[in-house]
Amino acid sequence: MERPDGTCRKTRRVYNQPGDAHELTFSCYHGFKMLGNDRARRWVVHAIELARRKHCFRLWAYVIMREHMHMLVFPTEPVYDMSAVVKTIKQSVSRRAVAWLRVNAPEFLPRLRVEWPGGRVEHHFWQQGAGYDRNLWKPEAQWASVDYIHMNPVRKGLADRPEDWYWSSARWYAGERDGPLAIDGQPPRIRMV
């Protein structure tokens, strides 16, 4: 796909494989810390809830950081479109953020501005593209993803323990059910042979 500056970006193929979990990552435009406040994080929570109702998936893990987010989801329908899940989440957050900025911080909008050939102008909240989507079918890989997701705030120095970060499912896994999103179960346990 051609960018407004005439360069091309790589596209990544999405595999809608029944029985696979999907590890998703979305990054804010240019690495801006636009998820660095509770208001924006609540927009993400709302968007995930909207996508969960609309596209029928189980949310197994998530973390909302300052400049990106991770999710581990498991589609429950035999036919699904992970691109539609991603689009629902990203568009919902982007629309709310841009509308809020227009009213409350219009001076920031030029930093998000993208002008396409032909003159069409957009404001990007998310980095362009589908983000990162990796299929996981082995329980060991799914649990490794849960651990990776939960350790993000610790690695970034935002929390001492994963469950100390409010905007993460680590709290749910630690038995604290007061987080912003309910979890729909968890990956299957690793089979011992």
Image (cartoon, rainbow, N blue to C red):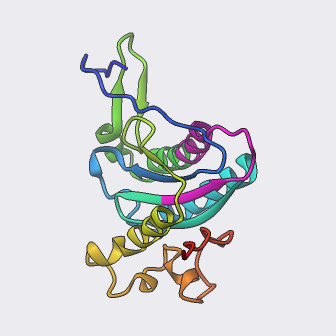
Could you say which is closer to the camera, residue 181 or residue 136?
136
Span highlighted in magenta in the image: 71-92
Where's the N terminus, which quadrant?
top left
Residue 19 in the image, given as x and y percentages of width and height? 65, 50
**Number of marks in the rendered image:** 0
In the image, is residue 151 above or below residue 98? Answer: below
Q: Quadrant of residue 70?
A: bottom left
In the image, is residue 48 above or below residue 12? Answer: below
Magenta span has 34? no
Residue 56 in the image, given as x and y percentages of width and height? 73, 51
Could you say which is closer to the camera, residue 139 or residue 2?
139
x 37%, y 50%: residue: 27
Q: Going by the image, does 149 lie left or right of 84?
A: left
- Residue at the extreme front: 193
x 51%, y 59%: residue: 71
Q: Quadrant of residue 59?
A: bottom right
Residue 39 in the image, given as x and y percentages of width and height? 50, 65
x 62%, y 38%: residue: 84
x 41%, y 33%: residue: 12
Q: Going by the image, does 102 lie left or right of 56?
A: left
Magenta span has 74? yes
Residue 111 in the image, given as x and y percentages of width and height? 29, 41
Where's the C terminus, which quadrant?
bottom right
In the image, is residue 28 above or below residue 164? Answer: above
In the image, is residue 12 above or below residue 157? Answer: above
